[in-house]
Amino acid sequence: MAADLVTIGPAPVDARADQVMIPCRDGVRLATDVYLPPGNRHPSVLVRLPYDKCGRYTFMPQLAPWFTERGYAFVVQDVRGKFRSEGETVPYVHEVYDGYDTLEWIVRQPWSDGTAGMFGDSYYGVTQWAAAAGGHPALRAIVPRVTSADLGAIRIGTWWDEGVPPLYGADYFAHYWVDRLIYDYPVDWTQRPLAGVFDEAFRKIGARSAAVDMMLRRVPFDDYPTGHPFDTIGIPVLHSVGWFDNIMPNSMRDYTTLRSRPRQAPRQYLVADATDHENYQLADVPIGPATDHDADDAALQRLIPVYLGPALDFFDRTLRGRGELAGLAQVRWRLGHDGWHEADAWPPPGTRELRLYLAGGRAGADAEGGSLTARADGAGAAVRWTHDPDNLVPSTVTDPFAFLREFPDERAVESRPDVLTFTADPHSRPLDLAGPVRLRVHVGSSAASMHLHAKLADVAPDGAARMLVRGQAHVPDPDPGGAVEISLGHTGYRLQPGHRLRVHLASSDHPLYLWHPGTTENPWHAIRGQRNEQTLVTGGAGPSHLSITVLGDA
C-alpha cells in the first residue's frame, strides 16, 4: 500500500491571481484566488471547491480568462479544510455560512459592483445551493452543474437499508476528505467486513476521514441550517445536466422539483448535454489521447467554450443585464447522435410515453435473453435467478464519473445466468428518446429484502450493448404480487436504425454498489453471505414493463 499511495497537494497559485485569506465568522480563513478584469467595479462569479483552486483537474486558471474578458471578477476558493484553507476537513456542514461570509467579503471590495453569481460542478454545485440557502442579497444567479441540492440523498446514499448505496460515495469520502490533501490508492472491495476497507490506507496516511466514520456510525451530515434552498430561492438557476452523468437522476430531480413549484418555476432553466460527470462527450467516443481533456491541453481548450458558454450567456443576462431572460430558451438540450434543440419545457412538446413489456423465459439464458415487446404477455410467466454474495455481478465500468471515457460493452456480464436481459426488435428508423425512463416490475426473493439493478442499453447491430441510463432499488419484503418502481432518470438520445433497446436486471453490481449479503445483517459488517432465489413475474394482470418518453411516432 505504501508504494501505491499517491499524495496530491496544491499546485502553485496562478501568476494572474491574487491569493487572499478570507476570514469567516468563527475566525477560520479560506484561501481565495481573485482574477480581475481591467477597470474599477465588476460583477463577480464565485466558485467554491474542495479539489484545489489552482489544480489542472478543475482547470480554474484556464477558465479565468473567459470570465475576465467578459468583464467578471473571477473568485475561486478552497473550501474549509481543503488545500490552502484552514479549518476542519468535513464535507457539507460549513458551506452555508462560509458561502455567505465569502459573498459578504466580495461585496465589500473596491472592485465589486455589489452583485455575484456562482458556478461549478458536483461538490461546487452543492456550495452554490448552500449559498442560496444562506440568502445573501448579492447572489443574483447560480449555475449548478452535474450536482444535487438534496443533502438527504447524499447522506442516505451510503446507508444500506434506505437505498442501494453507491460504494463510490464512500470511496469519495475516503480519498478526498481525510485532510487538506487528496490521496489516490487502490481499494480491495472484496475485503470483509467492508467497514474496514479503508483502514490500511488511513494508517499509512496517519489520519482518518471524519466523513467515512460518520457514514459508518449513521451520523447525518448537518442539513441546511437556514432551511432548504428550494423553500426560499428566488433567483434564476441554470441547471446543467449530463445524460451520462452518474448524478443525473439527482440533478434532474432538482430541476423538476423546482419547475413544479409555481413561484420558482419561471426562474428555472435547463441545459442538458450528452456528457458524463467529467465532461467527456458522447460525440468524442471512443475517447483517445487527442480527445482526453484531462490529459491533453488542446482537448481542454476545445472543451471550455462548450462547457462554459451557456453559463457565460446566462450571467450576461442575470448579472450584466445584457438581454432579457425572457429571450433565453427555457430548455436547451442535446439529442445524442443528433444535435442541440430548444424547448419551453421538459420533456419537450410532442413527446409521448412508449411502453415495452418484459417477456420470455430465456431472460437468463444468454445476452439476447427474453423479449421487450409492445404487447404484454397475459400468462404471468416467472423468471428465476440466484443471487450469490460470493459471486457478485461485476461492475462493467471502473470509474462511473468518467463513464464515456470507458463506455463499456455490457455483454461482459449479460451472458451470466444471474443477469436477466430483455431485448426489443431492431428499429427501422431513428427512435428519439427525450424525457424520463421508468421501470415497473414484480419481483420476489427468498430473502427478507433484495437489491435490484436496472439498466437500459443501446444494442448495436454487431451486438455491442452500451448503457444509456440506470436505476436501482432496495426492495424490502419483496413480493411478486406487488410492484417495484425504479426511476432510471432522464435521457436525450437517438436510437439509430438497426439498433435495439435492452433492459438488463441483476441483484448486484459490484464494486460500484454495496453488496447485499442475502441476510438481514448490515452489509458493512457482514463477513459471510447467503444465496437467495429471486423471481421476476413478467406478464399477468399488472405486467412488468419499461416506460420511455419518445418524440413523435415510434
Image (cartoon, rainbow, N blue to C red):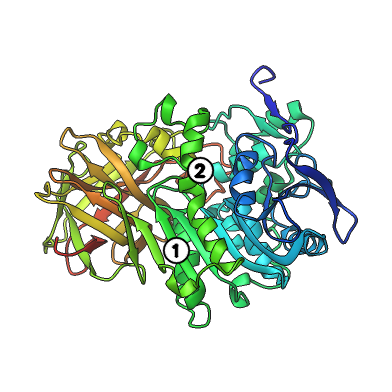
- Rendered view: 396 above or below 166: above
Quarter of the figure with residue 230 = bottom right
Of labels 1 and 2, the one closer to you: 2
Question: Secondary structure under badge 1?
Answer: strand
Identity of the residue furthest to the left in this view: 428
Q: Nearer the viewer, residue 219 or 141?
A: 141
Residue 311: image x %, image y %? 53, 57
Residue 381: image x %, image y %? 16, 56
- The reply to whether residue 424 is visible in this rendering is yes
Quarter the N terminus occupies: top right
Question: Secondary structure under badge 2?
Answer: helix
The residue singled out by tag 1 in the image is 270
Left or right of residue 120: residue 533: left
Query: Residue at 63% of width from left, 59% of height from top?
Result: 118
Cα gap from disc 1 to disc 2, whole angstroms: 19 Å
Quarter the C terminus occupies: bottom left
Quarter of the figure with residue 487 = bottom left
The residue singled out by tag 2 in the image is 304
- Rendered view: 324 above or below 10: below
Marked residue nearer the N-terminal end (1 or 2): 1
